């Protein structure tokens, strides 16, 4: 078929991954979770004892990384050097270290190169989600959207109740801190020119998927 790249950016906890995956499923498109690539690189660095403040070492690790990740919405797996890290990359230790890796420009260059290669390999028929897809990785995508949600909604979806226990407050702080660190390299809080904003604060999962599909249909 003809090219249909659906680029979806947004902060953590916006429901981006589950919505993007479902959109890919409904449109019979391939699916790429670029956050999983940054997480896999972080796992590789941490498990190899690489100093995350050493930009040259992190950049080299990005080039050395032997990564195999699912590109279909039906399966979720991430492997580094043949080791299944699907669950390991979601651990809090990785979530708190990932921004240090993602703010290393040389590492970004290498992962962006791989992301573009994967898009081509799938004949430009893919839903690609992350932070810089609409602006850097695939600015020429047929569909570009920014999926946002209020901070309250994003924390609620992560099961975090503001004004709750101390643990909940700590989790909330971790999420907002990660977004703050991430936004030092990529602006994913404001839609770039030509990017459609989808605010999911008051929508449930199904409503958000439907709204995203309407946005896609409009450009077809
Ligand atoms: O989407 P997810 O929360 O899994 O992304 C993990 C991290 O990867 C983000 O916090 C960010 O540091 C980084 N990331 C990025 N650019 C992307 C996708 C993710 O910098 N396109």
Image (cartoon, rainbow, N blue to C red):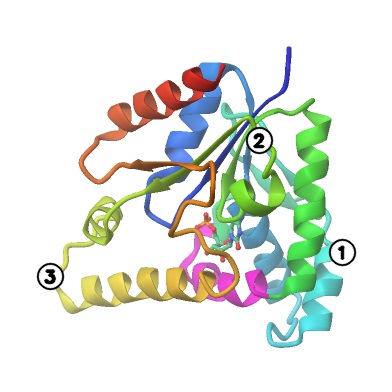
Magenta stretch bounds? 90-103
Q: Is mark 3 within 8 Å of ligand 1?
A: no
Residue 31: image location, x then y, percent: 62, 33
Q: Earlier in the sequence, mark 2 or mark 3?
A: 2
Residue ID for mark 3: 164
Q: Is residue 133 left or right of residue 161?
A: right
Rendered view: 200 above or below 3: below
Does the residue at mark 2 contact the one at mark 3 (Cβ under 8 Å)? Answer: no
Give the residue pinned by disc 1: 63
Observer-side mark, 2 or 3, equals 2
Residue at horizontal 44 percent and vertical 26 percent from the top: 215
Does the magenta run of residues contain 179? no
Q: Between residue 72 and residue 91, name the one nearer to us.
A: 72
Q: Which mark is residue 141?
A: 2
Q: Residues within 10 Å of mark 1 (few under 14, many from 20)?
A: some
The CA span between labels 2 and 3 is 41 Å
Ligand 1 shows up in the quarter that is: bottom right
């Amino acid at each position: 078929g003809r090219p249909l790249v659906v680029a979806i950016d947004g902060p953590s906890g916006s429901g981006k991954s589950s919505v993007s995956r479902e959109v890919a499923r409904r449109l019979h498109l391939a699916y790429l979770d670029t956050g999983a690539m940054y997480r896999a690189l972080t796992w590789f660095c941490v498990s190899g004892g690489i100093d995350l403040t050493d930009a040259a070492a992190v950049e080299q690790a990005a080039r050395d990384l032997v990564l195999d990740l699912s590109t279909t919405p039906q399966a979720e797996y991430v492997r580094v050097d043949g080791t299944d890290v699907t669950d390991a990359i979601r651990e809090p230790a990785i979530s708190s270290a990932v921004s240090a890796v993602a703010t290393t420009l040389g590492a970004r260059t290498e992962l962006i190169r791989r992301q573009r290669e994967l898009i081509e390999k799938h004949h430009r028929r893919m839903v690609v989600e992350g932070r810089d897809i609409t602006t850097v990785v695939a600015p020429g995508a047929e569909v570009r959207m920014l999926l946002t949600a209020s901070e309250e909604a994003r924390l609620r979806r992560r099961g975090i109740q503001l004004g709750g226990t101390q643990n909940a407050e700590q989790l909330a702080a971790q999420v907002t801190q990660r977004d703050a660190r991430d936004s030092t390299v990529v602006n994913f809080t404001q839609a770039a020119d030509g990017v459609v904003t989808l605010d999911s604060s008051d929508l449930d999962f199904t409503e958000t998927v439907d709204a995203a599909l309407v946005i896609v249909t409009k450009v077809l």
